[in-house]
Image (spheres, rainbow, N blue to C red):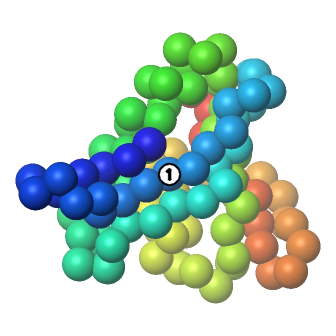
């Protein structure tokens, strides 16, 4: 999922695997710093949910460092919940649709 500015510059992206339904896995999320807290991730997440369901996925999973508080807040705001501890001070989060 890619988000563009009005000038067609990439300002955000989500890299995701959808090759093992019913689970898809977010491997990377980026939003340019100047566009953070503007709803870019929420918009991309909504688009991702639609695509995931179209591909037969019911759950979206990701891994995030426990000390990355802005990311944790953004994921929780968009319905992700911590499901388990991962390695290296990370947690897994899942959003069920």
Q: Which residue is mark 1?
A: 14
Name the one closer to the observer, 17 or 39: 17
Out of 88 and 78, give the one closest to the viewer: 88
The percent coordinates of residue 22 (x first, y second) are 74, 22
Looking at this view, name the residue that lies furthest to the right.
87
x%, y% of residue 96? 62, 32
Residue occupying the point 69% across, 76% down: 65
Name above or below for residue 94 compared with residue 36.
above
Residue at 76 percent of width and 66 percent of height: 91
Which image quadrant: the N terminus?
top left
Query: Residue 74, how many percent across, how many down?
Result: 44, 62
Which residue, as the protein is rendered here, is positioned at the far bottom? 67
Label 1 neighbour load within 10 Å: few <14, some 14-19, many 20+:
some
Q: Is residue 52 above or below residue 82?
A: above
Q: Looking at the image, can residue 34 be seen?
A: yes
Q: Which secondary structure, mark 1?
A: strand
The percent coordinates of residue 27 (x first, y second) are: 67, 55
* Residue depicted at x 33% and y 73%: 32
Query: Is residue 94 in view?
Result: no
Q: Quick check: 48 above or below 69?
A: above
């Amino acid at each position: 999922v890619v988000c563009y500015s009005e000038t067609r510059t990439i300002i955000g992206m989500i890299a995701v695997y959808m090759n093992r339904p019913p689970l898809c896995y977010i491997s990377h999320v980026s939003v340019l710093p100047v566009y953070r807290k503007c709803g870019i991730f929420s918009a991309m997440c909504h688009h991702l949910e639609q695509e995931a369901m179209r591909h037969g996925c019911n759950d979206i999973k990701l891994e995030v460092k426990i000390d990355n508080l802005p990311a944790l807040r953004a994921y929780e705001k968009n319905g992700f919940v911590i499901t388990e501890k991962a390695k290296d001070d990370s947690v897994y989060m899942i959003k069920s649709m």
